[in-house]
Amino acid sequence: MDPVAAVERLWPDRGASVVPLSGGITNHNFKIEVNGQAFVLRMGGAETGLLGIDREVEHQASLRAAEVGLGPPVIAFFPGDGWLVTRFIDGRPIPLEEMRRPQTIQRVAAALSKLHGAAPIPGRFDAHAVVEEYRREAEAHGVEVPPAYAAAHATSEQIRRTRGAQATVPCHNDLLNANFLDDGEIRIVDWEYAGMGDRFFDLANLSVNHEFGPAEDEVLLTEYFGEAIAAGIEALAMMKFMSDFREAMWGVLQSGISELDFDFHGYASKHFDRLAAHARALRVE
């Protein structure tokens, strides 16, 4: 649906203004200003259910994030349309170089600890299962799966066996730089991939998306756990691989289903190249 028509349906005859928000490569997001108040209208992209996105889970995760002070207040949810309306956070983006500073890493680690200690949310996120599902859906939509998938999947299975079963906690699972804002507190937006998962996936996803090196990883683990022991560093390295494997296969599937104007093939290739570098540094049995 046209966003202007959607806004007129949600706020009829209120003279609401509509401004597209940039940065999203899955959905369409708009800032809505009406009667002196500002909201964000999030309209799901095409076939996002194939990406493992459950809009009711996103809604419930958004409510939990608001409850613990990490996400914006949720105003309304329209399950039939896949629309979510939240308050607009008047915060500033956090540049990559700032995210790599020890003080910022400490603040973000504290925010993730708060999330991971929150009450359970619906949904399950298992990166090992996600990459397999993305492969199946890609093939079902006539998308050629890159040859690099086979070796990456073998490494994924090695990681699964090495780490074994892990306790699950509420996780965001999409900690891209664009999903962080600072309004005096660290805020996290876009909860569509949230679910009960492995805390180390969130930590690794944060690290790899912000290009942390060993020094930054040590700050992250020390702030989160109280110390950066060898087992934690190894677990982080394994899940960095899984983070890039998920992103690579996400790009592969999106290339066949998305209506957005974005180079998903290039995105997938970038992450396959990066996970190959991770694999060379892994210690898995």
Image: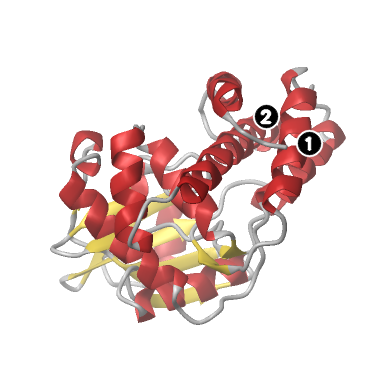
Coordinates of residue 169 in the picture (x, y in percent): 55, 70
Residue at horizontal 62 percent and vertical 39 percent from the top? 246
**SS at mark 1 in the image:** helix
Q: Is residue 138 left or right of residue 71?
A: right
Q: Is residue 220 left or right of residue 169?
A: left
Please name whichever residue, 97 or 176, is drawn nearer the observer in this view of the structure.
Answer: 97
In this rendering, the answer to whether 3 lies above or below 274 is below
Q: Is residue 167 visible?
A: yes
Please name whichever residue, 52 or 115, is drawn nearer the observer in this view of the structure.
Answer: 115
Residue at horizontal 71 percent and vertical 28 percent from the top? 152
Residue at horizontal 38 percent and vertical 67 percent from the top? 113
Label 1 Cα crowd, 10 Å radius (few <14 / some 14-19 / many 20+): many
Please name whichever residue, 47 or 99, is drawn nearer the observer in this view of the structure.
Answer: 99
List the single residue furthest toward the front.
Answer: 230
Name the quarter where the C terminus is drawn: top right
Residue at horizontal 27 percent and vertical 64 percent from the top? 88
Tag 1: amino acid: Arg
Return the disc, 2 or 1, that comes first in the chain's sequence: 1
Distance from disc 2 to disc 1, alpha carbons, whole Å, reads 8 Å
Q: Which residue is mark 1?
A: 135
**SS at mark 2 in the image:** helix
Mark linked to residue 252 = 2
In this rendering, the answer to whether 272 lies above or below 165 is above
Coordinates of residue 60 in the picture (x, y in percent): 53, 76
In this rendering, the answer to whether 33 lies above or below 103 is below
Q: Is disc 2 in contact with disc 1, using a CB cutoff of under 8 Å? A: yes
Coordinates of residue 268 in the picture (x, y in percent): 59, 25
Mark linked to residue 218 = none
